Image (cartoon, rainbow, N blue to C red):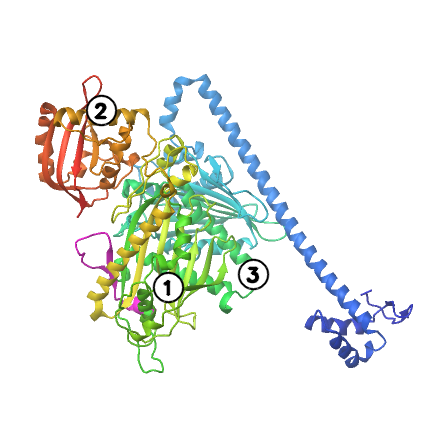
Amino acid sequence: MGGGSNNSHNIDNGKYVRYTPEQVEALERLYNDCPKPSSMRRQQLIRECPILSNIEPKQIKVWFQNRRCREKQRKEASRLQAVNRKLTAMNKLLMEENDRLQKQVSHLVYENSYFRQHPQNQGNLATTDTSCESVVTSGQHHLTPQHQPRDASPAGLLSIADETLTEFISKATGTAVEWVQMHGMKPGPDSIGIVAISHGCTGIAARACGLVGLDPTRVAEILKDKPCWSRDCRSLDIVNVLSTANGGTLELIYMQLYAPTTLAPARDFWMLRYTSVMEDGSLVICERSLNNTQNGPSMPPSPHFVRAEILPSGYLIRPCEGGGSILHIVDHFDLEPWSVPEVLRSLYESSTLLAQRTTMAALRYLREISQEISQPNVTGWGRRPAALRALSQRLSKGFNEAVNGFSDEGWSMLESDGIDDVTLLVNSSPTKMMMTSSLPFSNGFTSMPSAVLCAKASMLLQNVPPSILLRFLREHRQEWADNSIDAYSAAAIKAGPCSLPIPRPGSFGGQVILPLAHTIENEEFMEVIKLESLGHYQEDMMMPADIFLLQMCSGVDENAVESCAELIFAPIDASFSDDAPIIPSGFRIIPLDSKSVRLVNEGLSPNRTLDLASALDVGSRTAGDSCGSRGNTKSVMTIAFQLAFEMHMQENVASMARQYVRSVIASVQRVALALSPSSHQLSGLRPPPASPEAHTLARWISHSYRCYLGVDLLKPHGTDILKSLWHHPDAVMCCSLKALPPVFTFANQAGLDMLETTLVALQDITLEKIFDNNNGKKTMCSGFPQIMQQGFMCMDGGVCMSSMGRAVTYEKAVAWKVLNDDEEPHCICFMFLNWSFI
């Protein structure tokens, strides 16, 4: 019916019409302007186009219906073709992955058979090859021994590049690393890709392969610009570039990564990046660290950074039939976990966290760019996705800068008020001030903050999943925020002078959430928060009645495994201009994937971890609890709040910020307690489930205390001695007599709180470490013989140290010898009375 012909005639009184090319052209013009014209518009068309005068309006209506149907069919056919191409490429990818897995299985079967036949050689093999990287990594250890520097001349760098390429390809497509698929990452046409993490190899590693709707050259260009897609990358500087004979390039690069929390230093890397084209047309970008080289350029250590290592990693980008690329990513790091406190070490030993924050972040960014190109659209507040992405990067970068507080960015630390729970920094550098300065407005005033103050702190939490806690903080801002601080922050970036806020109890206003945009996998979304009912602040500050906050939220999916959760926000003007000043504040919660999780599954649940500022009285669930291991999650929360101010107000603003962050910490504690599964137990607080050995030890401790001191240590609490000991108000901890120096083997809840550690990490703490002062060491050295002979010793009040390095004062301490059932010394038990952090 919609076909064209040189003849025009009606058949059966207009029931069938052939249209001339001129008629089709006229109808197409109208269709392009209005695909679904009204009856009046169709009649107007007939009047304006004489060549359509012999066609009835009803037939014109039918033509438009058919035309819309053909357009819909064309789009559907195009969509199905795209899905078919994607499925074909994914099928190819899965077949390659299946081949790789078959090779890995064959390798494991061979090793298993060999070990069965030669059990005496198993130990020798373990000592010669400690990684799972098979031949490739073993060759790496042989070629690059730690005591022999590598040649970093141009020829030496080319040799290193070739080795790196071979090792990277073996990791990406071979069996050099034993990869384990991440939980919940099922391959499919709409999935982010196939994501796996390493098992048993040196350092931490993650691997991903997926489809990207961009050509290989564009993919390589984006991936090489790491600061544009990695929120953790502070800078990437190309120091030197060399060309190779095969058309490739060698780049010497210095890269810095932000620290995710205030409790650990940042990382930096001195590395080689090699880009080349393979024989099959695939692009390869591989990189590795140059930490042990000679005869070439080097990068001296940087203050405030720990030099980490990138093991052979990179990107394999292959062209895909029908357009796009097939991408393989391998990230393999050694982040030097020894440089952080034991309780946080799992952050630097988690391949899952590396996969989520680096490997998957690259794939998500590429998919976002691809979608924006194929489906350009305008999102919330008239912003295109690229503009919103730039805003989210500004929020994230500003928050990371506040958390790290690098001196080369102008940050300097203020003196503490005697309590080291909150750190204050000030930045008055011109670069920072360019972000906060405002222009004069019609009222004649100009707001010119001369500095930015940052108040930050970190705390350890347990028994509340990061996603649930963060979602509560987002949806119930009135539970932790002080609107007077919000009003002050908003006034500081607006025109007009502002004064310090006057706290008004119960003056929380309502909030309206205006969504802006989601990322492609809904892992992150942006929104504008409108705070209401703040009109009374106009008495103190010259500002509009409404306050707007630009807010970025991620990690609220409860089903995500070990996902980092962030809530970052900044006050903005109602105009919401692209160059508006942004001074972000917020929260970051990172799960701690440690040995504790495995102990939970084995029925040995670790203790809950204390907030670094003050105690949060949260119990742990038993192994039979309905919430399972989810109720035993551990995480580290980092809080950073920034305020712009004028220099003459520094002392007052510092005091206000310090008090505000402490109030936020206290509020987070209350929220965590309310959200913790353990808070809903009807039977009250219970100790973690323990082994029979723990019950036996509790009985020995109580019996020995009564024998030597003549009084009962524990009040009657049914028949459960361990429960009474666990909830004893004073810190009780046991020290082994077998190890030198003596190490702690057990502590009750108060003892773990005082040491700021867990049951797992407790065994890494020595007695000397907590008495890290001359008086304490002298007391212990002179007191040990007395304890062993007399059976006990009483000590006056003093000061000791927690595992986090914080000073702890105690009013009195008692130490006694713990005897087993055979009346033989088993350990020494200490009890610290009325302890508190200084």
Horizontally, residue 443 falls left or right of residue 55, namely: left
What's the residue type where badge 2 is placed?
Trp
Element at badge 1?
A: strand
The image shows a total of numbered marks equal to: 3
Residue at the right extreme of this rendering: 12
Horizontally, residue 275 falls left or right of residue 614, namely: right
Q: Given this view, does label 2 or label 3 mark the residue nearer the observer?
A: 2
State the residue at coordinates (66%, 55%): 79
| Real-space CA distance between mark 1 and mark 2, rounded to the nearest whole angstrom | 56 Å
What's the residue type where badge 3 is placed?
Ile
Which badge, 2 or 3, is on the more N-terminal residue?
Answer: 3
Which disc number belongs to residue 570?
Answer: 1
Which disc number belongs to residue 400?
Answer: none
Check if mark 1's residue and mark 2's residue have beta carbons within 8 Å: no
Which disc number belongs to residue 373?
Answer: 3
Give residue 181's position: percent from left, percent from top: 49, 38
What's the residue type where badge 1 is placed?
Ala
Residue 324 visible at all: yes
Which badge, 1 or 3, is on the more N-terminal residue?
Answer: 3
Q: Given this view, does label 1 or label 2 mark the residue nearer the observer?
A: 2
Label 2 Cα crowd, 10 Å radius (few <14 / some 14-19 / many 20+): some
Element at badge 3?
A: helix
| Real-space CA distance between mark 2 and mark 3, rounded to the nearest whole angstrom | 70 Å
Residues in magenta, as a range? 411-435
Q: Is residue 394 above or below residue 730?
A: below
The quarter holding residue 393 reads: bottom left
The quarter holding residue 796 reads: top left
Q: Is residue 16 above or below residue 182?
A: below
Q: In this view of the protein, which residue sits in the foreground, 673 or 32?
A: 673
State the residue at coordinates (86%, 70%): 6
